């Protein structure tokens, strides 16, 4: 099963499967009931320093991606079960960033694929 990405502000759908928030901070203005999460993996979100540097444009996308992939290596054993689970169930990584192609969920999905998650 592929790993999907979805903004926290988009409505949940049955085809989302397992919904996992991958941000360190709760999405502004979204209730717990509305988000309908199965899990919140804030420990694997970008560090506060990295998140702030990217949002303040101190880091470009390439530098952010490289730094976040480096941070994710420390969470390899935490993320390996998620990569394995994605082979059997649909997983949707939920993020709150406004940019659909340049956010932490995109990098996390790439890392999960390196751990063996399906494309």
Image (spheres, helix red, strand yellow):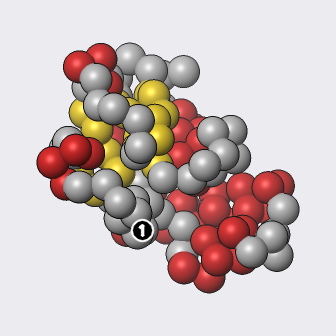
Percent coordinates x, y for residue 94 in the rendering: 40, 44
Residue at image position (53%, 61%) is: 72
Mark 1 nearby-residue class (10 Å; few <14, some 14–19, many ≥20):
some
Most distant residue in the left direction? 33
Rendering coords of residue 100 (x, y %): 63, 39
Task: In the rendered view, tell whether residue 22 sits above or below residue 117.
Answer: below
Asked whether, in this view, residue 99 is left or right of residue 11, the answer is: right
Q: Quadrant of the C terminus?
A: top right
Name the side, left or right, on which 109 lies relative to 52. left
Q: Where does label 1 land, which residue?
A: 24
Quarter holding the N terminus is top left
Number of marks in the rendered image? 1
* Any part of residue 53 in sight: yes
Secondary structure of the residue carrying numbered label 1: loop
Instruction: Indicate the position of residue 117 as horizontal and vertical percent values.
Output: 45, 30
Which residue is farthest front? 29
Q: Is residue 115 in sight in this rendering? A: no
Left-right relation of 38 to 23: left
Of residues 34 and 90, the one nearer the viewer is 34
Residue 96 in picture, x, y percent from top left: 48, 52
32 or 111, which is in the foreground? 32
Asked if 101 appears above or below 71 in the picture, the reply is above
């Amino acid at each position: 099963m592929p790993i999907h990405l979805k903004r926290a502000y988009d409505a949940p759908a049955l085809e989302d499967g397992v919904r996992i928030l991958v941000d360190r901070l709760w999405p502004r203005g979204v209730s717990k009931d509305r988000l309908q999460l199965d899990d919140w993996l804030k420990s694997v979100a970008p560090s506060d320093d990295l998140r702030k540097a990217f949002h303040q444009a101190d880091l470009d996308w390439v530098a952010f991606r490289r730094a976040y992939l480096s941070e994710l290596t420390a969470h390899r054993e935490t993320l390996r079960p998620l990569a394995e689970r994605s082979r059997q169930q649909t997983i949707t990584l939920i993020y709150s960033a406004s940019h659909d192609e340049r956010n932490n969920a995109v990098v996390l999905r790439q890392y999960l694929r390196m751990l063996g998650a399906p494309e």
